[in-house]
Amino acid sequence: MSTDVIAETRTTVNIIADTRTGNKDKVIVVGAHLDSVLAGPGINDNGSGTATILETAIQMKKLKIQPRQQVRFAFWGAEELGLLGSEN
């Protein structure tokens, strides 16, 4: 049995956006990651989660929703690479 090992340094970027309104002491966080395992198909891994969060943000703005709690939209990179994205 053989194993292929990849050893490299990677840099990741996360995108986080907060609503301007809502109670900042009670933040609701919704998030998704946009990467995939090395053997995977890429964005298909969590494309639906990311699309849902983006559409939620668009509709909140379009409908002029003023949330009672602040909403934080988070998009993590490198989530599948040892949870690197969610730890930064």
Image (tube, rainbow, N blue to C red):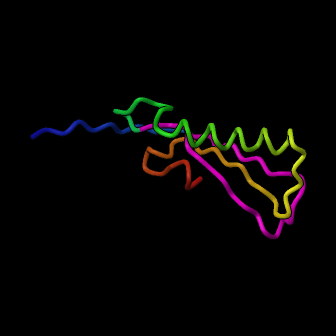
| Residue at 77%, 56% in the rendered image | 71
The foreground one among 61 and 79 is: 61
Left or right of 37 on screen, residue 43: right
The residue at 50%/38% (across/down) is 10
Spot the residue most to the top: 41
Magenta range is 12-36
Q: Answer whether residue 15 is magenta in the image.
A: yes
Instruction: Left or right? Give the position of 54 relative to 87.
Output: right
Q: Residue furthest left?
A: 1
For the image shown, how many numbered marks are present on the structure? 0
Q: Quadrant of residue 3?
A: top left
- Magenta portion: prevailing SS class: strand
Query: In front here: 43 or 49?
Result: 49
Residue 38, placed above or below residue 22: above
Left or right of 32: which side holds 35?
left
Residue farthest bottom in this picture: 25
- Looking at the rendered image, the quarter that the N terminus falls into is top left
Viewed as shown, does residue 22 lie left or right of 15? right
Front position in the image: 11 or 52: 52
- Front-most of 64 and 81? 64
Q: From the viewer's perspective, is residue 76 above or below residue 38?
A: below
Residue in view at x 63 percent, y 37 percent:
51
Residue 33, by quadrant, is top right
Residue 63 drawn at (x, y percent):
87, 43
Magenta stretch: residue 83 in it? no
Residue 56 drawn at (x, y percent): 73, 44
At 23% across and 36% down in the image, what residue appears?
4
Furthest-front residue in view?
63
Q: Tell me where residue 11 appears, x and y as whole percent.
A: 55, 39
